[in-house]
């Protein structure tokens, strides 16, 4: 019964998440390209979500069939796709929070830091590090799994009856699990600090009219980032401690690919419009403001 429930949930995530992310990627590339740091981070976030959706199709297959019949290499590939989404998404969302922090708190002093070239270098390093972590993980998995089971999809009861149940206690597996947990906790702290600093800056610097027009959108993005960590990323990282909750926590974490498009929508003024139209609209809206507020708001909206 639970297999059918998981298959339906994963299938629904694919049906909803695939078009949302494809459309988001098309809009980001067409209207914004990779001309700003935040656009670079968001494009890579979409790519990470699309890779996750690809891996979810195999979870639907497993829960429908009730067994893993695709071999060990396929198991490793789709397991790494899922884990890489959690790691890269959490990092890219943190990059977005830090970028917005610099844009609001240090709009002028951070200009030399918030460049497209540095953003590109940052995401390349992230992908390389994540892939490097996959190497020892894959070696450990390949050594312990066989052609008929896939640890990532197995239920605790199945694992206990498997000859490979000792995999749960493999030192390499535990090390990578705790690495991910520490990484997520560190990134969560960074997001919390960024949220507090931006909130304090907005309350201190912006006048009442600016608060009404901008503060809600600004803080909504930070609130969404914190929600992504608390609801999706952190719980799945606790699998290293609560392994018996693996199927449930993995299913919950997969929903993040359906929520990310909301982040793109609120991060750009006129997300559905061409970049030029958004800039004209923004210029008209800001015509009566001071130069300081123009710099602050333009850097927030356009990266």
Image: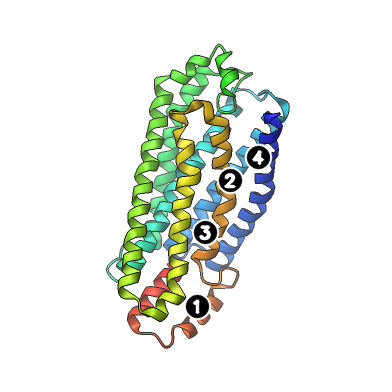
Q: Secondary structure at mark 3?
A: helix
| Up-down relation of residue 159 to residue 11 (above or below) | above
Report which residue position mark 3 lands on. Answer: 263
Residue 171, placed above or below residue 39: above
| Residue indicated by mark 4 | 10
Q: CA distance from mark 4 to mark 3?
A: 21 Å
Taking the image as shown, residue 217 lies to the left or right of residue 293, namely right
Above or below: residue 284 compared with residue 248: below
Rounded to the nearest angstrom, the CA distance separating label 2 from label 1 is: 33 Å
Q: Quadrant of residue 12?
A: top right
Q: Mark 4 packing: few (<14 Cα in 10 Å), some, or many (20+)? A: many
Question: How many numbered discs sit on the rendered protein?
Answer: 4
Q: Pointer 1: residues within 10 angstroms few (<14), some, or many (20+)? A: some
* Disc nearer the start of the sequence (3/1): 3
Residue 257 appears at what percent x and percent y? 57, 48
Residue 158: quarter of image: top right
Q: Residues within 10 Å of mark 2 (few under 14, many from 20)?
A: many
Q: Which mark is residue 279?
A: 1
Q: CA distance from mark 1 to mark 4?
A: 39 Å
Residue 102 in sight from this viewpoint: no
Is the residue marked by circle 3 packed among few (<14), some (14-19), or many (20+) residues within 10 Å? some
- Residue at left 51%, top 42%? 85
Q: Mark 1: which secondary structure?
A: helix
């Amino acid at each position: 019964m639970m297999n059918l429930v998981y298959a339906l949930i994963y299938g629904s995530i694919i049906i909803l998440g695939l078009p949302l992310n494809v459309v988001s990627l098309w809009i980001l590339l067409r209207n914004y390209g990779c001309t700003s740091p935040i656009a670079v981070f968001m494009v890579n976030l979409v790519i990470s979500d699309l890779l996750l959706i690809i891996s979810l199709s195999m979870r639907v297959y497993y829960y429908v069939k009730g067994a893993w019949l695709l071999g060990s290499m396929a198991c490793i590939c789709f397991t790494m796709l899922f884990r890489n989404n959690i790691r890269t998404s959490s990092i890219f969302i943190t990059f977005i929070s830090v970028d917005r922090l610099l844009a609001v708190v240090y709009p002028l002093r951070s200009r030399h830091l918030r460049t497209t070239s540095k953003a590109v270098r940052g995401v390349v390093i992230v992908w390389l590090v994540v892939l490097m972590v996959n190497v020892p993980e894959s070696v450990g998995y390949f050594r312990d799994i066989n052609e008929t089971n896939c640890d990532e999809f197995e239920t605790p009861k199945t694992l206990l009856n498997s000859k490979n149940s000792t995999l749960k206690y493999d030192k390499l597996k535990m090390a990578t699990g705790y690495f991910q947990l520490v990484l997520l906790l560190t990134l969560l702290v960074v997001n919390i600090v960024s949220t507090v600093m931006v909130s304090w800056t907005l309350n201190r610097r912006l006048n009442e009219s600016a608060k009404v027009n901008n503060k809600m959108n600004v803080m909504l993005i930070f609130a969404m980032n914190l929600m992504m960590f608390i609801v999706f990323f952190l719980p799945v990282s606790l699998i290293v401690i609560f392994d018996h909750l693996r199927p449930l926590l993995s299913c919950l974490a997969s929903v993040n690919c359906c929520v990310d498009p909301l982040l793109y929508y609120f991060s750009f003024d006129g997300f559905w419009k061409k970049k030029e139209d958004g800039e004209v609209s923004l210029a008209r809206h800001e015509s009566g403001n001071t130069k300081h507020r123009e710099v602050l708001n333009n850097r927030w909206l356009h990266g």
